[in-house]
Image (cartoon, helix red, strand yellow):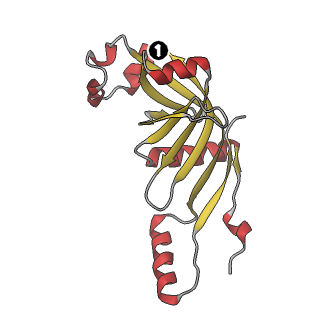
Amino acid sequence: MENTEDHLKNLAGAEAKAKLKELVEKAENCFFCSNIKTGLPFSTRPMSEQLVDEEGNIWFLSRKDSEKNAEIAQDPMVQLLFQANKHSGFVSIYGIAEIIDDQQKIDELWQPMFKVWFEKGKNDPVISLIKVDPTQGYYWDTKNGQAIAFLKIAASLVTGKAMDDSVEGKLEVSD
């Protein structure tokens, strides 16, 4: 039987940033949580990240007049929850959000489907960027990838022996 420590792998610095980028890019959406004061209901909404840059910052497009922008202006602490697929690739990130007005970055991130939310296109004056600088997080994933994890699950069901391929740990992203 495997030891619990075999499933724990805390990551820091460049290794944490790489794992964060890998898991966030696998996820199609996240729950973006703001107004996260202890003991009180927080605000959450589904969003799609647009980029995880080399520093580990996570970028979103948002309306300047949105409730989330107003909440970030009051308190920049946010939590982002990602799920890559049904069985692995989960990550919870705490970070500091910043509202940015940068047309060059908007142009870089723009996709035609965004006209659903910004009817005047990439030059719509209501577009803002949200940059989240991750400070800490936690992840749950597989050690050897989805295919091997699936095979271990199948073998475990046939043999009756536990063959857990999971790995989890803290992400210390900030320098």
Whether residue 53 is visible here, answered yes or no, is no
Q: Secondary structure at mark 1?
A: loop
Residue 95: x %, y % from top left: 62, 33
Q: Nearer the viewer, residue 175 or 75?
A: 75
Q: Amino acid at mark 1?
A: Asp
Residue 60: x %, y % from top left: 46, 29
Q: Nearer the viewer, residue 36 or 168?
A: 36
Residue 131: x %, y % from top left: 54, 26
Residue at the image point whose x is 60% and y is 18% from the top: 74
Q: Residue furthest top?
A: 125
Residue at the image point whose x is 32% and y is 13% from the top: 124
76 vs 31, left or right, is right
149 vs 134, left or right, is left
Residue at the image point whose x is 57% and y is 17% from the top: 73
Task: State which quarter of the image contains the C terminus.
Answer: top right
Q: Residue furthest front?
A: 40
Residue at the image point whose x is 44% and y is 68% from the top: 147
Q: Nearer the viewer, residue 138 or 38?
A: 38
Whether residue 130 is visible here, answered yes or no, is yes
Quarter of the view holding residue 36: top right
Please state the total of marks drawn on the protein image.
1
Residue 157: x %, y % from top left: 48, 83
In the rendered view, tell whether residue 114 sits above or below residue 19: above
In the rendered view, tell whether residue 143 sits above or below residue 70: below
Task: State which quarter of the image contains the N terminus.
Answer: bottom right
Crowding around mark 1 (Cα neighbors within 10 Å: few <14, some 14 to 19, many 20+) is: few
Write down the residue under mark 1: 102
108 vs 159, left or right, is left
